[in-house]
Image (tube, helix red, strand yellow):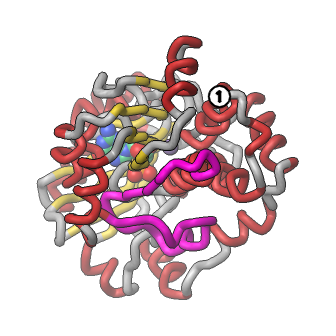
């Protein structure tokens, strides 16, 4: 983002505008934290602001400040489409290609509003009038902090905004342990704490709200864990039947993929989750070191993301998806054993 871009955006926001903020489908902590952080900042400028998510999000995010104002596209299609068509500015957060918004793809592509992208994923599309893309950033929430700071408005960050932004930095960095966590990330987090974000309370609200069934599902996932030592890979499967048995709710499988990576000497972790309703296997991939799960997912599973965290999908059955994964792996053994 150039100085000229910032001047342009400042000029744009100097008078009240109709603004829509959109995160990716199946929004996570960073997607919801960044949209609500930006929302709570923009409403201070007397803009008319709406956050529209493509669909619902996990219960552990349903306490964030102003969360109750979020509109879900799949449940309020007409209202959301009118807002998008009528918008002067659309911020797209935590994704960089319209197809990542699922069914919102066409209405977003058709809109002639000014688009502002804030995102940290690799290979951004060029739909935005203003693109703030930085793959070295831990999270979109960290970028929203820098965005507000670049506008010269860091002083307007209050406890509400700080709380939202802290959520996404914490969740996208695995509580500050992933390699995407930089000294700059900690500087931003320090500022957020000074503005009033309560780290311990936020952590409890996100991570300590497990239902008994969710822990039982985790037990099932862990007993399904398989290790392929030659490929330094561990993977987990969850069938629809297993999800049903433990009364699966959105968000229940969040973070489960990381258990594979916690096995000694493993650098590549995967989870395959059957979704009968969508007719797909949802895949999450994680790695340590230089092995790029983003490239792996782009090459084999219609997905993408970051070097160490990516997602994708498969239209094969659960068994066939896993068989495909196992058959591909040996060609990566050299790269995986160089880690
Ligand atoms: P997760 O495994 O937690 O769903 O996603 C890990 C990372 O990869 C996130 O940053 C997410 O936005 C990205 N990601 C997940 N699924 C997909 C996908 O299907 N396509 C692309 N391009 N990125 C994805
Ligand atoms: Mn993110």
Q: Is residue 196 visible?
A: yes
Q: Tell me if 65 is positioned left or right of 305 in this view.
A: right
Q: In the image, ligand 1 is in what quadrant? A: top left
Q: Is residue 174 visible?
A: no
- Residues 185 and 159: in front is 159
Q: What's the magenta region?
A: 43-72
Residue 27, horizontal then vertical, whole percent: 42, 56
- Residues 337 and 278: in front is 278
Q: Residues within 10 Å of mark 1 (few under 14, many from 20)?
A: some
- Residues 323 and 175: in front is 175
Q: Was residue 66 drawn as part of the magenta stretch in this picture?
A: yes
Cβ at disc 1 under 8 Å from ligand 2: no
Point 20% across, 38% down: residue? 109
Q: Was residue 181 drawn as part of the magenta stretch in this picture?
A: no
Point 20% across, 52% down: residue? 321
Point 30% across, 33% down: residue? 330
145 relative to 235, above or below: above
Residue 85, horizontal then vertical, whole percent: 24, 48
* Image quarter (top left, top right, bottom left or bottom right) of the C terminus: top right
Residue 269, horizontal then vertical, whole percent: 45, 47
Point 24% across, 34% down: residue? 112
Q: Tell me if 335 is positioned left or right of 140 in this view.
A: left
Residue furthest to the front in view is 15
Residue behind mark 1: 151
Q: Tell me if 224 is positioned left or right of 148 in this view.
A: left
Q: Tell me if 262 is positioned left or right of 325 in this view.
A: right
49 relative to 73, above or below: above
329 relative to 224, above or below: above
Helix, strand or loop for disc 1: loop
Residue 250, horizontal then vertical, whole percent: 40, 72
Q: Quadrant of residue 81?
A: bottom left
């Amino acid at each position: 983002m150039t100085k000229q871009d910032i001047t342009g955006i400042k000029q744009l926001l100097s008078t009240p505008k109709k603004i829509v903020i959109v995160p990716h489908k199946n929004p996570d902590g960073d997607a919801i934290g960044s949209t609500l952080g930006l929302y709570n900042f923009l409403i201070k400028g007397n803009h008319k602001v709406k956050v529209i998510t493509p669909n619902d999000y996990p219960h552990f995010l349903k306490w964030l400040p102003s969360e109750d104002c979020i509109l879900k596209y799949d449940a309020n299609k007409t209202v959301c489409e009118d807002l998008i068509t009528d918008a002067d500015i659309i911020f797209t957060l935590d994704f960089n290609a319209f197809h990542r918004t699922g069914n919102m793809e066409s209405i977003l592509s058709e809109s002639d509003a000014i688009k502002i992208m804030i995102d940290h994923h690799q290979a951004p599309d060029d739909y935005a009038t203003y693109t703030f893309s930085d793959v070295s950033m831990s999270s979109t929430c960290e970028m929203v902090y820098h965005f507000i700071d670049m506008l010269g408005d860091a002083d307007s960050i209050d406890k509400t905004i700080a709380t939202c932004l802290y959520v996404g930095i914490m969740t996208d960095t695995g509580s500050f342990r992933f390699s995407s966590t930089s000294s700059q990330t900690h500087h931003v987090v320090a500022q957020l704490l000074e503005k009033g974000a309560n780290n311990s309370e936020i952590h409890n609200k996100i991570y300590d709200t497990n239902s008994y069934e969710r822990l039982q599902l985790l037990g099932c996932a862990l007993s399904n864990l398989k290790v392929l030592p030659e490929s330094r890979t561990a993977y987990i499967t969850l069938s629809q039947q297993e999800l049903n048995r433990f009364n699966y709710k959105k968000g229940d499988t969040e973070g489960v993929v990381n258990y594979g990576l916690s096995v000694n000497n493993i650098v590549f972790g995967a989870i395959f989750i059957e979704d009968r309703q969508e007719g797909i296997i949802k895949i999450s991939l994680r790695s340590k070191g230089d092995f790029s799960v983003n490239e792996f997912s782009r090459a084999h599973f219609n997905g993408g993301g970051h070097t160490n965290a990516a997602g994708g999908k498969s239209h094969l059955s659960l068994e066939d998806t896993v068989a495909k994964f196992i058959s591909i792996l040996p060609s990566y053994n050299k790269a995986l054993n160089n880690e």
